[in-house]
Image (cartoon, rainbow, N blue to C red):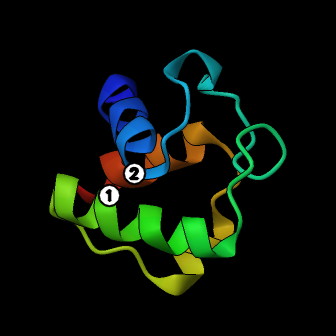
């Protein structure tokens, strides 16, 4: 699942895949701002066929949080 989320981050936000680790902080390490987070959310919803609420999106801090959220919805 991590590899799929990593690929989605790379494609959605043009981030170097080498920078993405499970413990990477979305804002501090990957530079994801609120607009990029919304764009990522839409891409993740399409990629994994899930719905991510605004509250869930706001609670995401690390890449691991994204993986856990997607796994909980599948």
Please identify the residue farthest to the left as the structure is shown. 49
Q: Quadrant of the N terminus?
A: top left
Q: Position of residue 29 (x, y in %)?
A: 79, 37
Please identify the residue farthest to the bottom as the structure is shown. 54
Crowding around mark 1 (Cα neighbors within 10 Å: few <14, some 14 to 19, many 20+) is many
Q: Position of residue 35 (x, y in %)?
A: 60, 75
Q: Eyeballing the image, is 62 above or below 21?
A: below
Q: Eyeballing the image, is 19 above or below 63?
A: above
Q: Position of residue 71 (x, y in %)?
A: 32, 45
* Residue topped by disc 1: 44
For marks 1 and 2, give the CA distance: 9 Å
* Residue topped by disc 2: 12
Q: Secondary structure at mark 1?
A: helix
User: Which residue is at 44% across, 82% downward?
Assistant: 53
User: Which residue is at 50% across, 74% downward?
Assistant: 38
User: Which residue is at 43% across, 36% downward?
Assistant: 10
Mark 1 or 2 closer to N-term?
A: 2
- Pick the residue in front: 66 or 44: 44
User: Which quadrant holds residue 6?
Assistant: top left
- Pick the residue in front: 59 or 6: 6
Relative side of 65 to 68, left or right: right
User: Which quadrant holds residue 22?
Assistant: top right
Numbered circles on residues, count: 2
Q: Nearer the viewer, mark 1 or mark 2?
A: 2
Q: Are marks 1 and 2 in contact (CB under 8 Å)?
A: yes
Q: Secondary structure at mark 2?
A: helix
Q: Eyeballing the image, is 54 above or below 58?
A: below
Q: Position of residue 55 (x, y in %)?
A: 58, 82
- Pick the residue in front: 33 or 5: 33
Please identify the residue farthest to the top as the structure is shown. 18
Relative side of 34 to 57, left or right: right
- Pick the residue in front: 65 or 24: 24
């Amino acid at each position: 699942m991590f590899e799929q989320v990593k690929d989605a981050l790379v494609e959605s936000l043009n981030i170097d895949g080498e920078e993405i680790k499970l413990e990477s902080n979305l804002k501090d390490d990957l530079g994801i701002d609120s607009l990029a987070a919304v764009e990522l959310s839409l891409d993740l919803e399409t990629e994994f066929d899930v719905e991510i609420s605004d509250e869930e999106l706001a609670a995401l801090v690390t890449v691991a949080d994204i993986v856990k959220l997607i796994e909980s919805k599948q």
